[in-house]
Amino acid sequence: MNARPIELHDVESILQIQSASPEVAQWTAWDYNRVARGEMAGWAVEEDGELCGFLVARRVANDIEILNFAVRPEARRCGFGETLLRRALQWGAELHAEKALLEVRASNFAALQFYEHRGFQVVGRRPRYYVSPAEDALLLCAEMR
Ligand SMILES: CC(C)(COP(=O)(O)OP(=O)(O)OC[C@H]1O[C@@H](n2cnc3c(N)ncnc32)[C@H](O)[C@@H]1OP(=O)(O)O)[C@@H](O)C(=O)NCCC(=O)NCCS
């Protein structure tokens, strides 16, 4: 299982996975077209020709930030998330990033378990950061070195 860069033809499948994942930011096709054009970093994983998940990240000063990340609900807990996160961290290491950062809804138990098992720690809380529904964000961080 390998992650590869997001391409323009992936955008429709990404939007379907995103629609089935209310935990993540609901971006538009325009946002993912920017990713496919290389304006942000992004990877996809597929199996038997079907897109199973995607991750979008950006560089912020000496760190990397994971901006959006989801796996198709039926394909979860099969290792696709791990493959995508590993690819993003490899990219961060190539950039000599110091930390990987992300925000997650405080109630997103699955994501918190996923990240905490992979070396991320909660380093902050942003009260009522999310809307629809309103909820705190937890700020997670992993040291890259
Ligand atoms: C978070 C997410 C991307 C993980 O993807 P995944 O493909 O399921 O992850 P993997 O199969 O590589 O890893 C699964 C591991 O994550 C943790 N995990 C994932 N879902 C879990 C759940 N529902 N309950 C407990 N632990 C869970 C466990 O450690 C699990 O390992 P295990 O199956 O051996 O117990 C996926 O759950 C998802 O798309 N969630 C909705 C969107 C989201 O929350 N994105 C992150 C926002 S920052």
Image: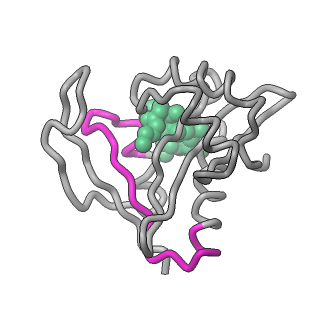
117 or 91: which is nearer to us? 91
In the image, is 4 to the left or to the right of 65? right
7 or 74: which is nearer to us? 7
3 or 34: which is nearer to us? 34
Residue 84 at what x, y percent from top left?
A: 63, 49
In the image, is 120 to the left or to the right of 78? left
The single residue placed furthest to the right in the displayed view is: 48
Residue 132 at what x, y percent from top left?
A: 25, 20
- Could you say which quadrant of the image residue 112 lies in? top left
- Could you say which quadrant of the image residue 101 lies in? bottom left
Q: Residue at x 61, y 42 (%)?
A: 34
Picture mark count: 0
Check the image and report above or below for 95 versus 24.
Answer: below
In the image, is 140 to the left or to the right of 37? left
Residue 27 at what x, y percent from top left?
A: 48, 30
- Could you say which quadrant of the image residue 46 lies in? top right
Q: How is the image coloured?
A: one colour
Q: Please state the extent of the stretch shown in magenta in the rendering.
A: 92-113
98 is within the stretch colored magenta: yes
In the image, is 53 to the left or to the right of 61? right
Check the image and report above or below for 22 versus 43.
Answer: above
